[in-house]
Image (tube, rainbow, N blue to C red):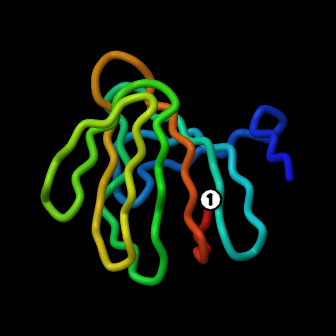
Amino acid sequence: MLIDFNSMEDTVLHEFNGGRGDVLAHMYFDGKSRIMRATLKKDCSIGEHTHTSNFEVIYVLSGIAKITMNGVEELIEAGNAHFCPTGNTHMIEQYGDDDLVMACVVPGVVFEG
């Protein structure tokens, strides 16, 4: 199944999960899971949140992400993936000068946006 992010409308998530600035998202939702391409501009972030009943996989397409999971920070760049298993807490921040562009998969979740 093809998911064409380029043909999707922009969705702006302002201060998403208590983060800073805006997340520009192109989202596919089938009623159970979200697959999205998300862009964070300089100094933007997705706030700390816990995956209580699902998990998340983030694949960095470009830029650098500073991810804090359960209090431990790590930098990931294009070609790297981050996995936040069920029951864990994380936050994602744009790091450096370039936009952070990520592909994100969150199965079994419903959120507004």
Image quarter of residue 45: top left
Total marks in image = 1
Q: Nearer the viewer, residue 11 or 88?
A: 88
Q: Secondary structure at mark 1?
A: loop
Horizontal side, residue 54 vs residue 68: left or right? right
Left or right of residue 93: residue 37 = right
Quarter in which the C terminus is drawn: bottom right
Query: What percent of the width, then of the height, locates residue 66?
Result: 26, 39
The residue nearer to you, when weighing 45 against 96, is: 96
The answer to whether 28 is drawn above or below residue 65 in the figure is: below
Residue 46, compared with residue 113, is above or below; it is above
Please tell me which residue is depicted at 75% across the width and 74% down the height of the picture.
31
Q: Position of residue 71 (x, y in %)?
A: 13, 60
Q: Residue at x 59, y 70 (%)?
A: 107
Q: In this figure, which residue is indicated by the disc labeled 1?
A: 113
Compared with residue 34, is residue 100 higher up or lower down, i.e. above or below?
A: above
Q: Amino acid at mark 1?
A: Gly
Asked where in the image residue 8 lies, by quadrant, the reply is: top right
* 50 horizontally vs 73: left or right: right
Between 69 and 43, the one lying in front of the other is: 69
Q: Position of residue 22 (x, y in %)?
A: 47, 40
Give left or right: position of 81 versus 103.
Answer: left
The residue positioned 86% from the left and 53% from the top of the image is: 1
Q: Residue at the far bottom: name it.
A: 53
Q: Residue at x 29, y 60 (%)?
A: 90
Q: Residue furthest top?
A: 97
- Near mark 1 (Cα within 10 A), the count class, few <14, some 14-19 or many ≥20, is few
Tell me residue 32's x, y (percent).
69, 76
